[in-house]
């Protein structure tokens, strides 16, 4: 606690209630008294010269026999008030700028250090709050930090720091992650070297509202400015307990889209460019995936995991394909519905399966013959020369002339030159 001692002549003994708590010694009294109605005024330009400041202390204006104005010099090196010869009674404040102490102040709230004032400490009985400014040896302000009751150094526990850090503005709380504001305007959170407008080194969490809805909003900073209605929102939506979704909202036109670009290293000049459009999700629901050409063994678009059965879709420069991987069959519209197609090229057999499991097979035999038969049973064989074989070749029909069947009007006839008439 700093004590300012003033010599007061003819002070009465009933001056007890202080406005400014200055401890004084009365020549006519052995005890120490408190003076009320004290003001401090500063005179003489800036008032600071050679580590001293001129201070006028004026007290007791309401008592003619006790009103004195005393002139002091305060030396910041020695932390002393040096009294000069008391001045005559003055009812007017000396010329100069008032040094406003209009409320109760205790000198113990003020601490000074040479060569500059460093701290202002307020103690409310349980905690001490410190506003501290430090200067380096060249007299340049270094930083400012606020301390709680367990005061620590800059950047330590229970300390909030605001400082000039090599040209950056640094804000730090209790030694935790810092915020750096660069002269360029870039802001870094938990990083001292932000290279973009905002760099965050750590996890970002957005939350707010009764339903824990967190939202990241993307706006266009161009010509539309704040009137831009094409706002994109990325937000977490909670519809009920433990029922959440991450939603991207794309307003408000059909040509709006969400895009994923990749393969920037494939550009001329090396990596770092914008790359090429790879996935395109339009607001209308249209989805486009742009991949490189590849056959059915490539990995263009895969549904399922690659270590088991999966479905693959893709294209080459000549055709598009759909492929079932993992030694599993590909079923198209298997739930009892029809499949319609135009020209179909089949490499292999066409198998007709009855619900009871029996199968009929239509396919090529020996590359030049078309066979129709029940699975693993003899059937029909149509040769490339137009001849028809039925049953086993060793015992079946191989007839170059007409074939007539009994049954009256039901008959079947085949001729050479592949002229065929059907049932009538």
Image (cartoon, rainbow, N blue to C red):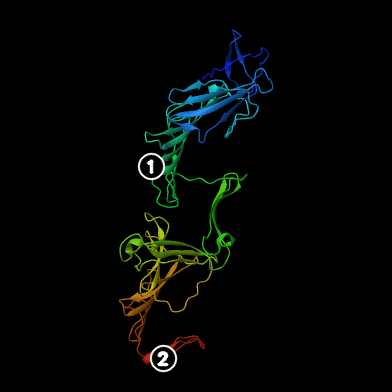
Q: Please tell me which residue is depicted at 52% across the width and 71% down the height of the picture.
A: 338
> Quick check: can you spot residue 136?
yes
Q: Who is closer to the viewer here, 153 or 397?
A: 153
Mark toward the start of the polypeptide (2 vs 1): 1
Give the residue pinned by disc 2: 419
> Quick check: can you spot residue 149?
no
Residue 106 position in % (x across, y down) = 57, 22
Residue 101 position in % (x across, y down) = 60, 29
Quarter of image, res 175: top left
Eyeballing the image, is 202 above or below 176?
Answer: below
Give the residue pinned by disc 1: 166
Residue 99 position in % (x across, y down) = 57, 31
> Which type of secondary structure does the marked residue at label 1 adopt?
loop
Q: CA distance from mark 2 to mark 1?
A: 99 Å
Q: Please tell me which residue is depicted at 48% across the width and 46% down the height of the picture.
A: 204
Q: Is residue 395 left or right of residue 355?
A: left
CB within 8 Å, label 2 to label 1: no
Q: Who is closer to the viewer here, 275 or 140?
A: 140
Eyeballing the image, is 57 above or below 250?
Answer: above
Binning the other alpha carbons within 10 Å of mark 1 as few (below 14), some (14 to 19) or many (20 upward) gives few
Eyeballing the image, is 44 above or below 419?
Answer: above
Q: Who is closer to the viewer here, 129 or 394?
A: 129
> Which type of secondary structure does the marked residue at label 2 adopt?
loop
The number of numbered badges drawn on the structure is: 2
Give the residue at the far top of this rendering: 30
Marks 2 and 1: which is nearer the front? 1
Quarter of image, res 202: top left
Name the mark on residue 137: none
Residue 41 position in % (x across, y down) = 58, 29
Q: Who is closer to the viewer here, 100 or 384?
A: 100
Binning the other alpha carbons within 10 Å of mark 2 as few (below 14), some (14 to 19) or many (20 upward) gives few
């Amino acid at each position: 606690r700093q004590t300012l001692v003033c010599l007061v002549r003819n002070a009465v003994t009933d001056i007890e209630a202080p406005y400014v708590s200055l401890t004084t010694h009365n020549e006519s009294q052995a005890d120490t008294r408190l003076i009320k109605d004290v003001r401090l005024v500063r005179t003489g330009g800036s008032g600071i010269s050679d580590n001293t400041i001129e201070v006028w202390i004026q007290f007791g204006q309401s008592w003619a026999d006790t009103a004195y104005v005393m002139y002091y010099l305060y030396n910041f090196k020695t932390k002393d008030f040096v009294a000069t010869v008391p001045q005559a009674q003055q009812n007017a404040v000396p010329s100069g700028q008032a040094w406003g102490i209009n409320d109760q102040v205790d000198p113990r709230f003020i601490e000074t250090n040479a060569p500059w004032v460093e701290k202002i400490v307020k103690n409310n009985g349980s905690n001490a709050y410190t506003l501290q400014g430090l200067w380096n040896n060249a007299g340049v302000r270094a930083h400012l930090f606020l301390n709680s009751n367990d005061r620590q150094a800059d950047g330590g526990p229970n300390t909030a720091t605001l400082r000039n850090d090599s040209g950056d503005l640094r804000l730090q709380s209790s030694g935790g992650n810092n915020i750096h504001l660069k002269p360029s305007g870039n802001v870094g959170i938990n990083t001292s070297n932000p290279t973009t407008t905002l760099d965050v080194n750590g996890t970002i969490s957005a939350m707010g509202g009764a339903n824990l809805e967190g939202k990241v909003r993307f706006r266009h900073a161009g010509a539309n400015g704040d009137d831009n209605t094409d706002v994109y929102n990325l937000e977490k939506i909670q519809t009920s307990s433990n029922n959440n979704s991450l939603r991207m909202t794309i307003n408000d036109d059909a040509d709006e889209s969400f895009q994923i670009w990749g393969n920037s290293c494939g550009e001329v000049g090396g990596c770092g460019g914008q790359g090429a459009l790879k996935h395109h999700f339009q607001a209308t629901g249209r989805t486009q995936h742009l991949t490189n050409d590849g056959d059915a063994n490539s990995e263009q678009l895969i549904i399922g995991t690659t270590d088991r059965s999966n479905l693959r879709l893709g294209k080459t420069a000549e055709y598009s394909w759909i492929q079932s991987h993992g030694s599993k069959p590909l079923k198209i519209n298997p739930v009892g519905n029809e499949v319609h197609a135009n020209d179909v090229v089949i490499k292999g057999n066409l198998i007709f399966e009855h619900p009871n499991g029996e199968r009929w097979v239509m396919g090529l035999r020996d590359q030049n013959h078309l066979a129709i038969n029940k699975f693993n049973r003899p059937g029909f064989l149509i040769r490339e020369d137009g001849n028809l074989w039925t049953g086993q070749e060793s015992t079946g029909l191989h007839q170059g002339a007409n074939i007539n069947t009994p049954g009256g009007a039901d008959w079947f006839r085949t001729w050479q030159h592949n002229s065929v008439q059907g049932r009538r």
